[in-house]
Image (cartoon, helix red, strand yellow):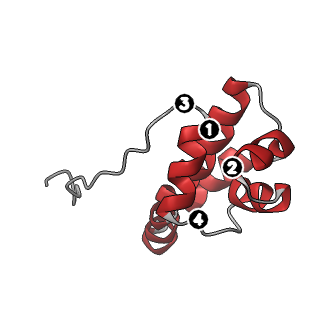
Amino acid sequence: MTTLNEFIEDQLKDPQFKEEYDALEPEFAVMQALIDARKESGMTQKELSAVIGISQADISRLEHGTGNPSIKTLQRIAKAFHMALKIEFVPLEIHGTR
């Protein structure tokens, strides 16, 4: 039986699939950062929602990638974790060069 990681690894050999997969990386990074920060803080989704003033359902949507947070929302979330939001532009690497 093929695992999910093996399946994805195989699919990434297709350039079109890889391009689409890579395009989703920023969204996955935001989702994972939110989940990691919340868990490290020991907060539940419900507790976080009370602190920042949005619904627990909205927190869940953000963590599952079905929400589209504004920068203001991300700043409020970061503040709840006593963190700063950092957004940066980095050069693209195209075929091993910048």
> Secondary structure beneath disc 2?
helix
Label ID, residue 15: none
Kind of residue sitting beneath label 4: Pro
Residue 7 image point, x, y percent: 68, 54
Q: Is residue 16 above or below residue 93?
A: below
Q: Is residue 21 above or below residue 88?
A: below
Give whichever of discs 1 and 2 has the lower sequence position: 2
- Residue drawn at 43 percent across, 44 percent down: 85
Quadrant in which residue 54 is drawn: bottom right
Give whichever of discs 4 and 3 has the lower sequence position: 4
Give the camera-side residue of 42 and 25: 42
Q: In the image, 64: left or right of 94?
A: right
Kind of residue sitting beneath label 3: His
Kind of residue sitting beneath label 1: Ala
- Residue drawn at 52 percent across, 64 percent down: 24
Give whichever of discs 2 and 4 has the lower sequence position: 2
Q: How many marks?
A: 4
Quarter of the image that includes the C terminus: bottom left
> Secondary structure beneath disc 1?
helix
Q: Which residue is mark 1?
A: 80
Q: Are marks 4 and 3 in contact (CB under 8 Å)?
A: no
Label ID, residue 82: 3
Q: Which residue is mark 2?
A: 52
| Farthest-out residue, left | 98
- Residue drawn at 52 percent across, 70 percent down: 17
| Farthest-out residue, bottom | 16
Label ID, residue 69: 4
Q: In the image, 56: left or right of 70?
A: right
Q: Is residue 13 visible?
A: no
Q: Are marks 1 and 2 in contact (CB under 8 Å)?
A: yes
Q: Are marks 3 and 1 in contact (CB under 8 Å)?
A: yes
- Residue drawn at 60 percent across, 46 percent down: 77
